[in-house]
Amino acid sequence: MCGNPNTRLLSRLIIDFLLLLAVYGAALVVLPQQLTTAQRGFHCSDASLRYPYHQPWLTKAHLTLEVVALPAAFILVVEILRAALLPSSVELRQRFVFVGARIPSFISECYKVIGVYLFGLGLTLLVIRVTKFSTGRLRPYFFDVCQPSWVDEEEESRQSCGSQSSSNATRYIELFSCTEFAASQELLALVRHSFPSGFATSTSYAMVFLIYYMQARLFAPWLRVLRATLQLACAAMALLVCLERLSTYQNHLSDVVAGLAVGFSLASFVVIFVAHLFREVRVKRRQWPRNEQIYGYAGYYNRATYGY
């Protein structure tokens, strides 16, 4: 059964689908329901938490377009153009056969690259979720949104930062409640999830992955200027997202820097150790006989592989 090419290909498709489903299910459904946000306190004299709340320019819809739709569309276009324009003498147009149907090589390449990219994006979301819930760092607009108050056991009265004496200004308050009733429950939950910046982390992962992908696939000498321009555009897009998080006081500077570092590290890990984007291996050259059988190999040639 395992020797059947159709069975092997179908098994790989099922395993890949279940793996992606498990990663995204854990990141988007299981962890937000099971994890408890760490209850982190504050000092009333902490000026880093006294910024006003501003509506962010970027929404989750913008982030989805930037980290899902844009990379998938770019990879699809590049692979289609490569299949249409690349001479057969440079790279053999391999085709897989599944249940008697021949699959063009650009479809298999798109599946491999996009699949690896989505797997890395799922890992990025897992890291973001776990880190945000475990640290519970307060956002810069904490005081403006929460208006915290607490019960002073010594004076047996409810206190706030506005009524607190100067002698207790540096007192660390850990048990408190928010008194700003105009703030929504979603916003009050977000106020404890500042580290790391989720937008900066996911965007840097997506853009760094695309930069690596361009370096590996757009290798023709006449594409160097275009490749460099596109790579700079990706880097600028990640930088703009980071500046937006800082200018609207959504995250601290250290949150954004940590997000950039995590996104870059995960993208590098996926490209080097999972996708093997820059590694060349010997691939068997297939010779298609007249009877449409998929067997009968002859010769070898070197080409880039994606870990498959």
Image (cartoon, grey):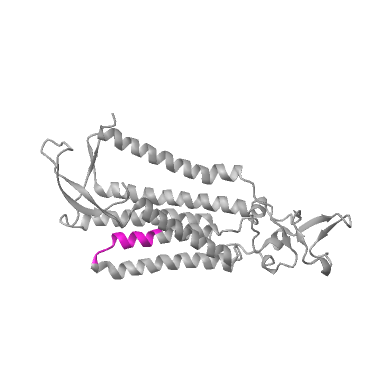
In the rendered image, residue 273, in percent from the top left (x then y), is placed at 38, 53
Q: Quadrant of residue 213?
A: bottom left
Residue 214 is one of the magenta-drawn residues: yes
Q: Quadrant of residue 302?
A: bottom left
In the rendered image, residue 80, in percent from the top left (x then y), is placed at 27, 54
Residue 83 visible within the image: no
207 or 133: which is nearer to us?
133
Q: Quadrant of the N terminus?
A: top left
Residue 298 visible within the image: yes
Q: What is the total number of numbered labels drawn onto the structure image?
A: 0
Q: Is residue 100 above or below residue 93?
A: above
**140 relative to 166 in the view: left or right:** left
**162 relative to 140 in the view: left or right:** right
What's the magenta bit mostly, secondary-structure-wise?
Answer: helix
Extreme residue toward the right, this view: 155
168 or 66: which is nearer to us?
168
Q: Quadrant of residue 16?
A: top left
Residue at 66% in and 63% down: 141
Extreme residue toward the top, this view: 1
In the rendered image, residue 30, in percent from the top left (x then y), is placed at 55, 42
Boundaries of the magenta span = 209-220
In the rendered image, residue 185, in percent from the top left (x then y), is placed at 67, 50
Residue 103 is one of the magenta-drawn residues: no
Residue at 12% in and 35% down: 291
Residue at 86% in and 54% down: 153
